[in-house]
Image: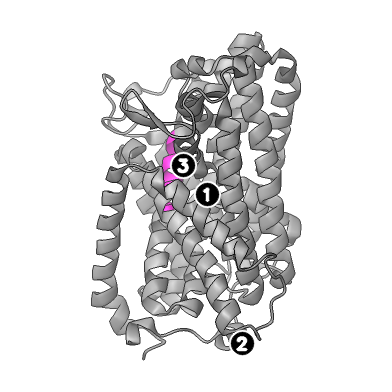
């Protein structure tokens, strides 16, 4: 069938790119850390702890293992086909055009909606920081309508503005993006290490008992609770490391540097997540976080009497979430650039500004849409859509490694995932486990998004595909 036509990997490798190669291993590592460390530590730890108690560290480990195995598969593909597009391009090579389009449509959901969701958390920390300096933003402009029960709000102005600012940085070019991201990641890591050093002395082991109050999977107050549901929640924390592979055409020696960047960023982030989680649930009883859902770290600082750290931590949180938004919008612009180049999206999204060497128009188009979404839409009910979209991409990339090893063992791979076929199979199993922890409403919304994508594919993409024409 024509909809399953595949790209020839040799054609991809021989294609020249107008994008500028400037990223090294540590740039990619910082890009990955910039995408991973942010919302997970500064926002989701509270909700996760209430879902599973002190065993949240185990939930983070499960999510990290899932991402680790999937990361090995991404690393092999990135070394085999070092071109922009990430899972979209890998699916085009392995399974054909319609599957590639679906996963590209899926990644647009992951990156754009993910950035909008994180910007809402960014807004909360920013408003709190401004209050500390005596600057008060009108309440009606601090959240979208219906976000906080009993509180009248109309528009999330800080979230809207930060996305526009980041879009401007991305549109300036990859060198500007790299410098801004690297600087903010260094400051963010310094703040996290300072927090660990200042609070580890206040850990009370009795707060870790019982360690798993809700077991692996149970229902508490009518909602799923336990280690597995919490892992499904905090999986959001790791979303974005895959965007590192979107930078393939802007990376120096990508077949070697991409795998290193992916695995280093995952490893460093996992260690910090587990350390932070154990300290936070050790300093205060996990039930305390019910009063600090928007800023759980503040519960720890209040309990230790180190309120002087709150402003520093708020700055770290703001920078942390800024880099997450930056990397997600960066990955999103490169996905749509790749899809446009293949004819599956209008040419507008693939046009590269010769001076900036970046897909300038597409970057601004989706930046503005994401900003408006963050400003006007209550994202509390939509955030889990990001998780299911990402898990679907992980499953397809892992399956793609199995397929390519079987069908094209002769293709050169700068990095080979160890333990194949077990590594991709384990990655798929962990992804399915986390998908099982999501509620049925999330599945319904995902099916609706999927159906909209198919309408676009058969009415536009199928007719304009460059591979077919």
Q: Residue at x 35, y 36 (%)?
A: 380
Residue situated furthest bottom in the rendering: 469
Q: Quadrant of residue 456?
A: bottom left
Let me know if residue 125 appears in the view: no
Instruction: Say if the magenta span includes residue 72.
Output: no
Q: Is residue 235 rendered to the left or right of residue 305?
A: left
Q: Secondary structure at mark 3?
A: helix
Cα distance in 3D space between marks 3 and 2: 40 Å
Front tag of 3 and 2: 3
Helix, strand or loop at label 1? It is loop
Which one is in front, 308 or 230? 230
Secondary structure mostly taken by the magenta-highlighted segment of the chain: helix
Residue 74: x and y in percent read: 60, 64
Q: Which residues are magenta?
A: 110-120
Residue assigned mark 3: 232
Taking the spot 40% from the left edge, 47% from the top edge, the residue there is 436
Q: Where does label 1 land, which residue?
A: 239
* First reached walking from the N terminus: tag 3 or tag 2: 2
Upstream in sequence: badge 1 or badge 3: 3
Rendered location of residue 254, percent (x, y): 69, 70
Residue at image mark 2 = 14
Percent position of residue 144, x then y: 31, 34
């Amino acid at each position: 069938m024509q909809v399953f036509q595949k790209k020839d990997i040799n054609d991809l490798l021989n294609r020249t790119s107008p994008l500028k190669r400037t990223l090294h291993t540590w740039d990619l590592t910082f890009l990955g850390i910039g995408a991973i460390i942010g919302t997970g530590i500064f926002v989701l730890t509270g909700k996760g702890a209430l879902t599973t108690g002190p065993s949240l560290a185990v939930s983070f480990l499960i999510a990290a293992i899932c991402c680790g195995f999937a990361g090995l598969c991404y690393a092999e593909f990135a070394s085999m086909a070092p071109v922009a597009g990430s899972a979209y391009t890998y699916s085009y090579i392995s399974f054909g055009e319609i599957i590639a389009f679906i996963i590209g449509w899926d990644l647009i959901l992951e990156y754009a909606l993910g950035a909008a969701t994180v910007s809402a958390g960014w807004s909360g920390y920013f408003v709190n920081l401004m209050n500390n300096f005596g600057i008060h933003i009108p309440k009606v402009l601090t959240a979208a309508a219906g976000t906080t029960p009993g509180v009248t709000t109309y528009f999330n102005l800080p979230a809207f503005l930060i996305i526009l600012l980041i879009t401007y940085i991305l549109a300036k070019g990859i060198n500007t993006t790299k410098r801004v991201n690297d600087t903010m990641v260094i400051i963010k890591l310094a703040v996290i290490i300072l927090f660990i050093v200042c609070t580890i002395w206040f850990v009370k082991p009795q707060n870790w008992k019982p360690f798993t109050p809700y077991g692996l999977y149970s229902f508490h107050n009518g909602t799923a609770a336990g280690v597995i549901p919490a892992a499904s929640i905090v999986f959001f924390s790791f979303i974005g490391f895959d965007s590192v592979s979107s930078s393939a055409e802007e990376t120096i020696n990508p077949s070697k540097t991409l795998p290193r960047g992916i695995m280093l960023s995952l490893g460093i982030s996992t260690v910090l997540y587990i350390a932070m989680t154990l300290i936070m649930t050790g300093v205060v009883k996990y039930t305390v976080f019910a009063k600090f859902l928007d800023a759980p770290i503040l519960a720890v600082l209040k309990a230790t009497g180190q309120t002087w750290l709150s402003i520093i931590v708020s700055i770290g949180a703001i920078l942390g979430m800024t880099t997450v938004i930056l990397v997600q919008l960066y990955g999103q612009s490169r996905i749509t650039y790749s899809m446009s180049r293949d004819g599956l999206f209008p040419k507008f999204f693939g046009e590269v500004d010769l001076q900036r060497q970046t897909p300038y128009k597409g970057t601004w188009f989706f930046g503005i849409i994401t900003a408006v979404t963050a400003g006007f839409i209550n994202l509390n009910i939509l955030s889990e859509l990001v998780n299911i979209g990402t898990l679907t991409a992980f499953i397809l990339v892992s399956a793609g490694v199995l397929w390519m090893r079987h069908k094209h063992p002769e293709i050169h791979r700068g990095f080979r995932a160890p333990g194949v076929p077990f590594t991709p199979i384990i990655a798929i199993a962990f992804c399915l486990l986390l998908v099982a922890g999501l509620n049925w409403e999330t599945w319904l919304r995902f099916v609706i998004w999927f159906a909209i994508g198919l309408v676009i594919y058969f009415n536009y993409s199928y007719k304009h595909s460059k591979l077919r024409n």
